[in-house]
Image (cartoon, rainbow, N blue to C red):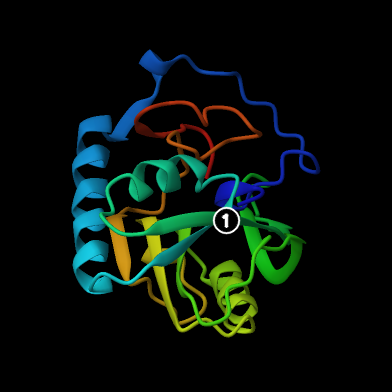
Amino acid sequence: MMWRNRFNAAVWCVSVRYLSVNELEVLISREEIAGRVAEIGKQITADSAGEAVIFVGVLKGAAVFLSDLVRQVKLDATFDFIGVASYGNPSEQGKVWDSTGEVRLTKDVDRSLRDKNVILVEDILDTGLTLTFIKRLLLGHQPQSFRVAVLLDKPSRRKLAIQADYVGFTIPDKFVVGYGLDYAEQYRNLPDICVLPDVG
């Protein structure tokens, strides 16, 4: 998702030095991620009862999670992508991006979802504003079934009552990067999920 963790670096130019991997606190290791993704894949396989599924990943943050997840699913499966941008205001500290609920579509799916079994794949669920927007949008495509898989859940920031069907990890209210999640387009390629200090 664009402006992950609700921080718009292009608008609010808070300078943070790029930290090396050794300077970051690892919140969830690559081994823990791999194990949990495999478990979710098995659960999706069992729940789908042999029916084909279409995974829809939210750009850009969910791309890594999606690519690992689909390889753990023993089904006839394919995937597509959707893109959104969210808007909001900085917190009193001027660092944390707090979504106001204004969300717009930047890329729709490329194929029909009508009468398909759709699983939306998102990197992080926090306020629920963006996920609610995407869910309504994709349900408008009239899929046969609709489920949500998120890598991370941050319930302390929830503004709307929405839950995922599959959750990798529940985390505290900290700014996290790695495994697809970014800070100003940095850190996406880290294999672990790390806490970025001095943000949030």
- Where is residue 168 shown, x and y percent of the image? 29, 54
Q: Please state which of residues 44 and 90 is positioned toward the viewer in this rendering.
A: 44
Horizontal side of 29 relative to 109 (left or right) equals left
Q: Residue at x 46, y 32 (%)?
A: 197
Q: Residue at x 41, y 69 (%)?
A: 148
Q: Quadrant of residue 28?
A: top left
- Where is residue 87 shown, x and y percent of the image? 74, 61
- As drawn, the residue found furthest toward the right would be 11
- Where is residue 8 shown, x and y percent of the image? 71, 46
Q: Residue at x 41, y 66 (%)?
A: 53
Evaluate whether residue 83 shows in this view.
Answer: yes
Residue tagged 1: 80
Q: Please state which of residues 15 and 104 is positioned toward the viewer in this rendering.
A: 104
Horizontal side of 1 relative to 123 (left or right) equals right
Q: Residue at x 24, y 63 (%)?
A: 45
- Where is residue 124 shown, x and y percent of the image? 45, 55
Residue 150 vertical placement versus 94 (above, below): below
Q: Tell how many labels.
A: 1
Say what amino acid the circle numbered 1 marks. Answer: Asp
Q: Please state which of residues 198 and 66 is positioned toward the viewer in this rendering.
A: 66
Residue 8 vertical placement versus 89 (above, below): above
Q: Please state which of residues 169 and 54 is positioned toward the viewer in this rendering.
A: 54
Residue 36 vertical placement versus 128 (above, below): above
Horizontal side of 95 relative to 25 (left or right) equals right
Dot 1: element: strand
Evaluate whether residue 123 shows in this view.
Answer: no
Q: How busy is the neighbourhood of tag 1: few (under 14 within 10 Å), some, or many (20 plus)?
A: some
Horizontal side of 172 relative to 190 (left or right) equals left
